[in-house]
Structures are given as C-alpha cells and as structure tokens.
Image (spheres, rainbow, N blue to C red):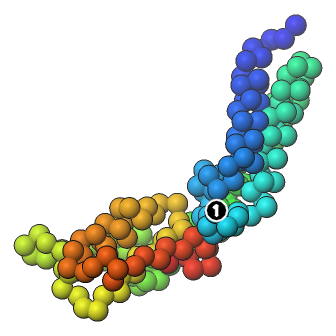
Amino acid sequence: MSTFSSVPAYLAGALCIGLGVNGMIHPAAEYPRFGLPLEGSPERGAVSPLIYLKGVRETTYGLCLVALQYQNQETAITTVAAVVSLAALSDGFVVWSAVILPQYISVLQVTGTASSAHAMRRMSGYTLQAPDGGQLLHQLKPLVLVTEAGSSFYFDPATTTRKNQNTLSHLWGSTKGEWVTNHVVFRGL
C-alpha cells in the first residue's frame, strides 16, 4: 500500500508529456517558454532540431514518472523528480550564460558602466521626447532608427519599433521600413 497520493506523480508526468508534445508540435512557440530567442523566421523552418530533442526529453521524463507511479516505485519517483529538477536548473544556467548574460554585458559595454544600476541611471538621461511632450523623431532627416534586442525574450516590435515608426506621420508609408531579425548572431539588432 502506498503511503503517498499518486496524484502528484501522475500530474507531473502528464504535465511533462503535455509540454514535450506541445514543444514538438509547435517548436517556434517553445523558444520563448524555454528562454531562447527564435533563430529565424518560423515560416522558413528556422527552428533548431535541438528544440525537438527538448520536446522528446520532456515527454520521456513524463512517461518515466507515470510508469514508475503505475508500478508504485515511490523511491524511484523521488529520484527521477530530482534528476528532472537538476535538468531544469542546468537548462536555466545554459540559457542565462548563453543569452541573458551576453545581453547584460552588452548593455554595460554600451553605457560604459560597471553595474546595471549605473547603466539604468546613464540610460535615463536619453530621451526622444521634446520639452513640450512631443516626439523629436519627426525632426530627424534622413532617419534611420535602430532598436536593439529584436530576437530577445523581452522585445515586442509593437511597443518599440512600430510605436516609434507610427509617430513619424510626416513620412509616407512607402518611405518607412522595418527590419527585425530573429537571428541570434545579430544579437537581436
């Protein structure tokens, strides 16, 4: 007779299976959930095969949890849950060191500061707002506007690039263009 409820193991297993299958069916949507920038346009099949391996890994973790619970292997379930947690921590470290840390270092280099607090203070001095509250962008001719972080997890073109582009009402639609990369090599520029 089991001393613990079987519901948590079955629930964790089903969750892992669901996340894994979803990652294999919708690989482009898996990138932001995992914390990675999309490598290219999903329409052109630019998702990495490694994202499918991640989906398979999560599915097998879930199947393992369900199978062990079905066999009433409580000690093994605890061990597998610890291994799955270790894998999640390792994934987080890889994403942090490969994606978040380089972006953080770039901000420090661009602002010439040694800490994020100093970088924020330094960046707060820059504005595109005129003293009367209007935008200064419409006064720039010719205009090239570059916004960074096109492929990062916190970037949304609707609230950054397009917002600034839409304020340029003096330019015709055909004279304005937008290029937002999703390729990591450009650092989202």
- Which residue was labeled with disc 1? 42
Q: Residues within 10 Å of mark 1 (few under 14, many from 20)?
A: some
Up-down relation of residue 28 to residue 141 (above or below): above
Instruction: Give 134 or 81, whichever is nearer the viewer.
Output: 134
Q: Position of residue 173 (x, y in %)?
A: 31, 76
Q: Position of residue 109 (x, y in %)?
A: 47, 83
Q: Which residue occupies the extreme top position in the image?
A: 1
Can you see residue 128? no
Q: Which residue occupies the extreme right position in the image?
A: 71
Q: Quadrant of the N terminus?
A: top right
Q: Residue at x 37, y 74 (%)?
A: 119
Total marks in image? 1
The amino acid type of the residue labelled 1 equals Pro
Q: Quadrant of residue 184?
A: bottom right
Q: Which residue occupies the extreme left position in the image?
A: 132
Q: Residue at x 60, y 64 (%)?
A: 37
Q: Residue at x 18, y 85 (%)?
A: 139
Up-down relation of residue 59 to residue 109 (above or below): above
Q: Residue at x 28, y 69 (%)?
A: 166
Secondary structure under tag 1 reads helix
Instruction: Give 95 or 54, whichever is nearer the viewer.
Output: 54
Q: Position of residue 132 (x, y in %)?
A: 7, 73
Q: Position of residue 169 (x, y in %)?
A: 21, 74
Left or right of 179 in this view: 24: right
Left or right of 77 in this view: 41: left
Up-down relation of residue 171 to residue 103 (above or below): below
Left or right of 89 in this view: 84: right
Up-down relation of residue 11 to residue 148 (above or below): above
Can you see residue 186? yes
Q: Quadrant of residue 75?
A: top right
